[in-house]
């Protein structure tokens, strides 16, 4: 059986979780502006020639634009979720450690 972590090891681990959460939150922020730009890059048949519209360029563009905007929105949401989960893990572990739960249950 391994020995329990020291308070300094716990502190370092909690700081690492929170630091990683900040990295993911920053990544979500980095994706936000391109997501907004992609959402606003809408073109319709007026911006394409008559022939281009008739052969499907307008529909093809719309599909690509919606796909890119959707992927960026999902990335922002997923990055935020990861950051939130890491913070929640750190907060829960810290609360439990302060309450002595890990020592009582011999779980680290």
Image (spheres, grey):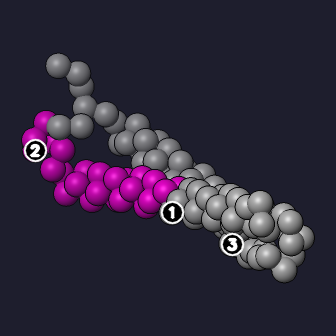
The residue drawn where x is 89% and y is 70% is: 49
Helix, strand or loop at label 2? It is helix
Residue under the image location 16 percent in, 42 percent down? 103
Q: Which mark is residue 77?
A: 1
Q: Residue at x 34, y 36 (%)?
A: 6
Q: In the image, residue 83 lies at what x, y percent?
A: 48, 57
Q: Earlier in the sequence, mark 1 or mark 2?
A: 1
Q: Please, which residue is most extreme toward the bottom here?
A: 46
> Which of pointers 3 and 1 lies earlier in the amino acid sequence?
3
**Residue with the mark numbered 3:** 39
Boundaries of the magenta span: 78-106
Q: Which of the pair 21/39 is nearer the observer? A: 39
How packed mark 3 is, by other alpha carbons closer than 10 Å (few <14, some 14-19, many 20 or more), is some
Q: Position of residue 82 (x, y in %)?
A: 46, 54
Q: Is residue 45 above or below residue 92?
A: below
Using the image, tell me which numbered label, if any, was put on residue 56: none
Vertical relation: 77 (above or below) 15: below
């Amino acid at each position: 059986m391994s020995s329990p972590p020291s308070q300094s090891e716990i502190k370092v681990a909690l700081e690492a979780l929170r630091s990683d959460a900040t990295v993911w939150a920053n990544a979500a922020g980095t994706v936000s502006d391109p997501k907004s730009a992609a959402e606003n890059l809408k073109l319709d048949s007026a911006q394409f020639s008559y022939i281009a519209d008739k052969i499907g360029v307008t529909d093809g563009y719309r599909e690509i634009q919606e796909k890119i905007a959707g992927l960026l929105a999902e990335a922002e949401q997923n990055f935020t979720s990861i950051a939130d989960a890491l913070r929640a893990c750190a907060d829960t572990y810290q609360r439990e450690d302060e309450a002595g739960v890990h020592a009582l249950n011999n779980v680290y």
